[in-house]
Amino acid sequence: MKNKKILLIIIGFILAFSIIGGTLYLFKDEIFDYTSSVDENFENEKEEIATATPLLYEVTKDGEDTKIYLFGSIHVADDRAYPMQDKILEAYSGSEYLAVELDLIAFEKDFKAQMEMLQMFLCESGKTLKDYLSEEWYEIIIQYMKDNDVYNSAYEMYRPSMLYSLISGVSTDKSGLNSDDGIDRYFLKKAKRNSKKILELESAELQYKLLASMPDELYEMMIISFIKNEEKEIASLKEMYEAWLNGNIEEFLNNSNQEDIDIEAIKEDLSLEEQQLFDQVLELMENFNKAMNDDRNDGMLGTIDTYFKEGKNVFVVVGAAHVVGEYGLVNELGRLGYKVQLIEYK
């Protein structure tokens, strides 16, 4: 591929939602490890002062008693996320249901479901991973996995989409954040301890089908982007987490999307053939981000709307990338006639 360096830089800038948008964290630490990583003993919250101020919205409608809370989460965190603000815990306690993208704790315990989902990522008959990657990049990717202790010979049976989830998790580990401290996991543990009813906005099948449906060449480019831009990816994740802690995710996303990149200026330095290739890459990335965020937002919006119409008081925990932004759930619920109010902690 021509101008690989430019393409990798652009991909590095565009890719921003895998951690706060959800889905991709599902593979991490679970593949080929059939023992549950879930701590069954829910630890008591530390007696400390809450400092994190993540985004929490109250959703109501005039003349209706039903109330839904929308909490923008992040799927990896550290102890700075805890303890939660009293207003968050009160909103959770006062809700009859907890809704999450996916009950990942139940999924981790369902060996049969995991095996069914993994079938979607197997190589075609007679092929191995090497058949889906260029020879040069195959060697780079495998060596990177070995260097970071995430390689298993069994992965040779799977397509690049599997490797993408594993390799993107390396940046998470090196950032000092981890999925065990993730916000959705925290509330799932709490709900299971308190016997609160749990609802799923999506399903494992939907999320895995979405991952498996993306082109192999796109995953190859994104994997290489993670490897070549590892330090930038780690720094970006840390900045994203700080933004989540401070409740300014929307500002961060608005300042870190592809609109900050002068696409036309870059294309001026490319040949006609390279410009065409560049446009194809951008289209792939746009389709990826649309599928991962905008399209899923539509499904989540319909489900939340149904909760309200059924009179269910629900505490909804969903990736912050789905909550904010022009087509995020906050704006879309407002367009449906709901009153969406940001909860102030002071």
Image (spheres, grey):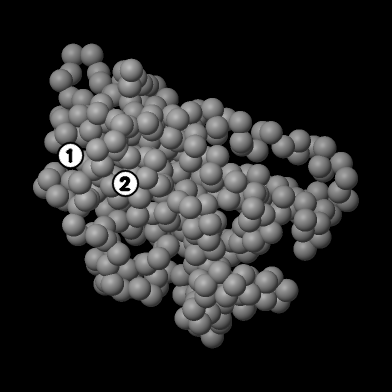
Q: Residue at x 81, y 42 (%)?
A: 266
Disc 2: CA contacts within 10 A as few (<14), some (14-19) or many (>=20): many
| Residue under label 2 | 184
Q: Is residue 34 visible?
A: yes
- Quarter of the figure that contains the C terminus: top left
Residue kind at label 1, given as amino acid type:
Tyr
Q: Is residue 220 above or below residue 152?
A: above
Q: Residue at x 27, y 53 (%)?
A: 103
Q: Residue at x 58, y 44 (%)?
A: 236
Q: Is residue 173 above or below residue 242?
A: below
Q: Are marks 1 and 2 in contact (CB under 8 Å)?
A: no
Q: Nearer the viewer, residue 257 or 264?
A: 257
Q: Is residue 242 left or right of residue 319?
A: right
| Residue under label 1 | 97
Q: Nearer the viewer, residue 242 or 56?
A: 242
Percent position (x, y) of residue 145? 57, 71
Rounded to the nearest whole Å, what is the CA distance between mark 1 and mark 2?
Answer: 14 Å
Q: Is residue 61 left or right of residue 139?
A: left
Percent position (x, y) of residue 274? 82, 53
Percent position (x, y) of residue 237? 54, 46
- What is the count of numbered marks? 2
Disc 1: CA contacts within 10 A as few (<14), some (14-19) or many (>=20): many
Q: Nearer the viewer, mark 1 or mark 2?
A: 2
Q: Residue at x 65, y 38 (%)?
A: 258
- For marks 1 and 2, the one nearer the N-term is 1
Residue at the limit of the structure toward the front, as seen here: 47
Q: Give me the disc on residue 233.
A: none
Residue 286, located in which quarter of the rendered image?
Answer: top right
Q: Is residue 109 left or right of residue 228?
A: left
Q: Is residue 55 visible?
A: no
Residue 134, located in which quarter of the rendered image?
Answer: bottom right
Q: Secondary structure at mark 1?
A: strand
